[in-house]
Every structure is written in C-alpha cells, then in structure tokens.
Image: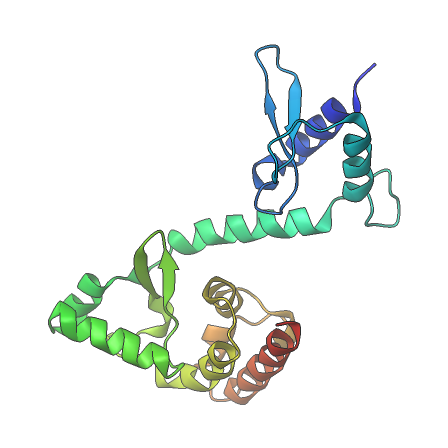
Amino acid sequence: MTSTGERIAAWLEGLGLDPHLAAAGLPTFERDEHGRAVWSDPATGERLTGDQLEALDALLHAEGDDPAFAVPVSLVQVARQARLRGELLASAWFTYETLAALRGTSIDAARFMIHKTGSLHRLLVVSDEGRVLVPAFQITSDGDPRPDLAPVLEPLLAAGMDPWRAWIWLTQPAALLGGLVPEQAAADPGAAALVARAAARLAERVTDSS
C-alpha cells in the first residue's frame, strides 16, 4: 500500500510542482537511496510524522470543487511566478553598462539616471541576484524612459508593488484590460487612459493588501 507521503510526492511530481514547495512555505521532500520520498518540516528540518503528512494532504486538497482532484492554488501560483520570472529574464533588459552604451554616457551617469527616475516611480528597476535590471520594454531607442508609461508605472510603484509582479503584469495579457498587454496598450492613444485606470485599480489592491 502506498504511503501518504509517497502518494503526495508522486502527485506533486506529476504536476511539476515539487520544486516550488519551499517557496510556498510548505514542507519539502527528497528521495532517499531507495527512491522513497522523505518529507521534512521547513522550520525545524525534522521529518514529518504520519499525522503531519495527513494534515499536509488535506491542506493541499483543500481548494476546488472536488477535494479528491483539487490542485493547490497557492502552489500553482508560486510555480507560475517562477516560470514567468524565467521568461522575463530571457527577454530584453539593460544593466548599467548596456544602458550607458545605448545612451552614449558614462556608467555612473546611467546609474544616476536609473535610480533617480526609479525613485520618482517613472522607471521599473528590478533586482536579481545582486544585479540591477531595467526591463527594456520601457526604454526608447535613445535610451530614455518611455513617457507614455509614466501614468502606468507611477501608481504601481508608488503603491509598493513588487517589481517582479509589476514586470509580469505590464508584459502579460491583463484581465483588467480585456486581454491587452498593458505596456503595449499604453502606446496606443486610444487605450492609454484605460491602461492608466487599470494600473490605478491594481495599485489600490496592492495598497489594500499591504
């Protein structure tokens, strides 16, 4: 008979969600030399008891119309965020050095511009493993911040929205815009006001949840 821990592990592996357990604050497992799933508590590092595994099983199946087949929504969201981060890092972005080259200025001048404009909530600046990244979608061919994005960026960044979440929202089809991509729609004079309103509504949600 398959143990609870083995059944949960196999289920999550089948969904491709097992790498994201720790990021979701959930217990994690490793396969031992016999291929068996060994679960541990993220806070203590102690091996989970049978009762704890039953509680974890119930938690993971708590959402959805049919608990037997429900997928842990929070874990799926963490996995989606990780996938989207990878896609964003594969897209175009600038560093101090590359933006300085585009602008024809010194690295120090580019650094000053980035942080000054970012502090005014007119430029999205993202940190990644010690690097400072400037997503390229918001930069003109001359190396300046796109002025049409200012009304969109300002409410989001002023509300303290996580830069990664802002990057994702700005570059993915948005429900608030009927599937339009915010940064693209902002360049359309006919849709710019709609994008600004959507950004303001999203900023209100961020403020309310903080």
Residue 56 vertical placement versus 158 (above, below) = above
Give the side of residue 75 with respect to residue 153, left or right.
Answer: right
Residue 140 seen in the figure: no
Is any atom of residue 132 visible in this view? Answer: yes
Which quarter of the figure has residue 14? Answer: top right
Picture coordinates of residue 142, whole percent (x, y) = 21, 77
Question: Residue drawn at (61%, 10%), measured in percent from left and top?
Answer: 34
Q: Is residue 71 left or right of residue 41?
A: right
**Residue 45 on image: x %, y %:** 60, 32
From the top left corner, tell me how far across and down residue 11 is, in percent. Answer: 72, 31
For the point 35% across and 51% down, the residue is 129
Residue 161 in the image: above or below residue 70? below
Q: Is residue 27 above or below residue 87?
A: above
Residue 117, image x and y in percent? 31, 80
Foreground of the two, 207 or 146: 207
> Residue at (57%, 46%) from the top-left corner?
23
Q: From the viewer's perspective, tell me whether residue 84 is left or right of residue 147.
A: right
Check the image and name the residue furthest to the top: 34
Q: Residue at x 73, y 22 (%)?
A: 6
- In front: 4, or 64? 4
